[in-house]
Image (cartoon, rainbow, N blue to C red):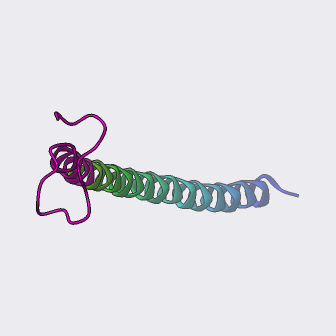
Amino acid sequence: MSDRQLAKELQARNVVAERIAAVLVQRRKIGAQGRIHEWGYQRRDNQRAVVNYNMLDGEAMAHKRTAQQGHPSISGTTGSRYSRQ
């Protein structure tokens, strides 16, 4: 092979290598964006879970308080063993 042919082949390989590198960089960028979105979804899901837990926990505590006090709105209860008698 002549020097000219070797130079052309080397140039063609460099072009292909640059295209492959560009694709890999783009995939890395897309993967990072996907992870960022996924982290955002996880954070929002965790926040919703905490809010729901606190709401349910608050309702449970209110119900427990009324049951302990023997509240008349709860039918069939005479109070709990912890209520004042």
Q: 14 left or right of 79?
A: right
Q: Quadrant of residue 18?
A: bottom right
Residue sticking out furthest to the front: 85
Which of the 4 quarters of the picture holds residue 29? bottom left
Report how many numbered discs are placed on residues in the image. 0
The stretch in magenta equals 56-85
Kindly indicate the quadrant of the structure image that contains residue 23: bottom right
Q: Position of residue 80 (x, y in %)?
A: 28, 43
- Nearest the eye: 19 or 39: 39
- Given residues 15 and 77, the one toward you in this image is 77
Residue at image point 21% right, 37% down? 83
The spot of residue 38 in percent (x, y) is: 41, 56
Q: Is residue 70 magenta?
A: yes
Left or right of 65, for residue 34: right
Residue 81 against residue 12 in the figure, above or below: above
Q: Residue at position x 17%, y 49% from top?
A: 70
In this view of the protein, which residue sits in the foreground, 63 or 14?
Answer: 63
- At which x and y percent is residue 1? 88, 58
Q: Is the residue 78 above or below the residue 65 in the image? A: below
The magenta stretch spans residue 10: no
**Is residue 58 shown left or right of residue 6?**
left
Identify which residue is drawn at 51% across, 52% down: 28
* Residue under the image location 21 percent in, 50 percent down: 67
The quarter of the picture where the C terminus appears is top left
Q: Is residue 16 left or right of residue 71?
A: right
Farthest-out residue, right: 1
Residue 19 is situated, as x and y percent measured from the top left of the image, at 57, 62
46 and 32: which one is in front? 46
